[in-house]
Image: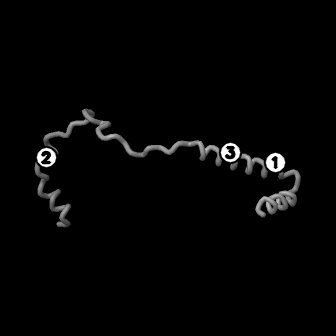
Amino acid sequence: MIPDQLIEEIKLIPEDRLAEIYDLIHFFRLGLKQESTVKPINLERPIGLAKGSFQVPASFFEPLPTDLLDAFEGH
């Protein structure tokens, strides 16, 4: 049913505009074909990719200044 409806609609389009419809259908079909051949990407990353590229400074573990702690607590 839908193919017949499409053909009837296409028959109503002025001939000088048919190239646009062809391009639309052609590129849509190519996109569908490409979707079916594209392999899904593994979004999980291995652990430890940046190992050794950064070292946490010792100051990171020192207590924060009182004024900064107060700011976090809303004082």
Label whose residue precedes the other's in the sequence (3 or 2): 3
Type of amino acid under label 3: Leu
Residue pictured at 69% horizontal, 49% vertical: 28
Q: How is the image coloured?
A: one colour
**Relative height, residue 21 to residue 4 (above, below):** above
Residue of label 3: 30
User: How far apart are the alpha carbons under marks 3 and 1?
Assistant: 16 Å
Task: Determine whether the residue tagged by mark 3 lies in a helix, strand or loop.
Answer: helix
State the residue position of label 1. Answer: 19
Q: In the rendered structure, which disc, 1 or 2, sits on the residue that comes first in sequence?
A: 1
Q: Give whichever of 75, 17 is nearer the camera.
A: 17
User: Which numbered dot is residue 36?
Assistant: none
| Residue 13 left/right relative to 26 | right
Q: Position of residue 55 (x, y in %)?
A: 21, 36
Q: Which amino acid type corresponds to the residue marked 1 in the rendered image? A: Ala
Q: Callout 2 environment at 10 Å: few (<14), some (14 to 19), or many (20+)? A: few
Q: Amino acid at mark 2?
A: Phe
Q: CA distance from mark 1 to mark 2?
A: 67 Å
Q: Quadrant of the N terminus?
A: bottom right
Are the residues tagged 3 and 2 within 8 Å (C-beta)? no
Look at discs 1 and 2 and give the one toward the viewer: 1
The residue located at (78%, 49%) in the rendering is 22
Q: Earlier in the sequence, mark 3 or mark 1?
A: 1
